[in-house]
Image (cartoon, grey):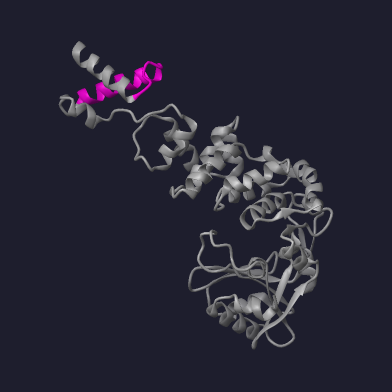
Amino acid sequence: MTAAAVWAALEPGDRDWLRALAAHAGPGARVALVGGAVRDALLGGACPDRGTPGVDLDVVLDGADVEGVARATALPFTFHPAFQNATVTLPDGRGVDLVRARRERYPVPGRNPVPEPGTLEDDLRRRDFTLNALALTVTPDGPGALLDVSGGRADMEARVLRPLHGRSLFEDASRLIRAARLAARLTLSASPELLAQVPDALGMAGATPRLWAELKLLLQEPRPGRAAGVLEAWGAGGLLPGTALLAALDARRDAGADLPWTAYAAAALSAGPAPAALAERLGLGDRPGALLDRALSDSFHPPDSPEVLLRALLRPDAYPPLTGRDVVARGVPPGPQVGEVLAHLAALRRGGGLRSREDERAALERYLQER
C-alpha cells in the first residue's frame, strides 16, 4: 500500500485537519501521522469491533513548537510540559496527541522513560512494535512519504508482532499486555523475539505500574477473553486470573449479550485469591466488586442482565428465586409479612435446603400452612 492509499483510508475531515496542522507547523518542520491510524490502514482498515467512532490520530512534530501549533488549531488543548506534548480535542470529542519528536532512555526499567529531543526517525525507533513504528508524513498539500525504519511493513504482511529491540519488554513490561491486546484484536502472531522476552516482562511486572493499567485496558477490549487467552498461550496467564471465565463471556457477547467491561472485571476478581487486592492493583474502582456481589447473591435481576449472565457462570446450579410478587400471588397481603416469607426462603437457600424454584414453592406452602 502506498502513502496515497493510507491517506485515502482516512476520513475526509481528518485529512483536512492534518493538512491544516502541517500548515500551522510552518516551513522546515515535519508533521507525521503515526501509530494505529497508519497501522490499521495498512492492515486493510481500522478494526471494526473496537467500538469507538472515528480513527485515533497520533501526530509527531519534528522541528515545530508543539504548544504553538496546538494553539494555532483554535481547538481546546492540554499541554504537557514534561514531554513537550499536547492533547487537542477535536469537535467530535476525539483527542489527538501532538508529540514532539524525541528519543527515550530508561534509567530504571519499569519506570517512566526520560525524554530527549530527537528526530522523527528517533521517535519511531523508541516505540513498542515494528508495526507501530510506521509514519505517514503530511504537508499542507496532502500526503508525503510513508516511513518504515524497522521493517514494520514486512511484519505486517506476515501478520507478525515483533518488538523493536531485545530489551523492549524488560524496559517496559506493560508492552507484553499491549502485545496481547493487539494480537487478539488484529489476529497477529508473536515473533520468536517477542516470545523470548516474555520471561523478562514477567520478571519486571511487579516493578512496572503501567502493566496493571494495561491489564485494565485489556478488560475493556472487544474480546477480553481472547486477549487473556493470548497471554496464557505465551506463558503469562498468571497475570490475570479467570481466562476461561473471560472466554465464556466473550461467547455470550458474540451471541448478542450486552456485557459491560465491569462484568469481565468481576469475573477476573471471582477467580483470584484476593479480589480486593487485585481490584486495587488494577485500579478497577468499586463497580466490578459490587457487580460480583450481586451476581453471587440470590437477589432478582432481569434475565439478560450482567448479574444473571455472571451468575450462570459462577453459580451454574443457581435458579431464579421467588419474588415478593410470587408471595403476594399466593395470597400473602402486601406488607411486612412478605418480607418475612422472603427472609425465611433466603435462610433455607443459604442452608442448602433449596435446590430449585419448585423447592421454593414447596417450602412456601409449608411455611404458609404452619402459619
Span shown in magenta: 336-356
Up the image or down, 8 lies above or below 177; here it is below
Q: Residue at x 65, y 83 (%)?
A: 22
Quadrant for residue 280, please give it: top right
Q: Quadrant of the C terminus?
A: top left
Quadrant for residue 350, please give it: top left
Up the image or down, 240 lies above or below 103; here it is above
x and y percent of residue 223 in the render? 56, 50
Up the image or down, 276 lies above or below 172; here it is above
Q: Residue at x 61, y 37 (%)?
A: 241
x and y percent of residue 212 in the render? 64, 46
Magenta stretch holds residue 22: no
Magenta stretch holds residue 339: yes
Q: Quadrant of the N terminus?
A: bottom right
- Whether residue 310 is visible here, answered yes or no, is yes
- Whether residue 371 is visible here, answered yes or no, is no
Q: Nearer the viewer, residue 129 or 336?
A: 129
Up the image or down, 31 lies above or below 331; here it is below
Prevalent SS, magenta region: helix
Q: Residue at x 52, y 43 (%)?
A: 264
Point out the residue furthest to the top here: 370
Quadrant for residue 362, please give it: top left
x and y percent of residue 184 in the render? 63, 52
Q: Residue at x 60, y 39 (%)?
A: 243
Q: How many marks overall?
A: 0
Q: Is residue 334 left or right of residue 297?
A: left
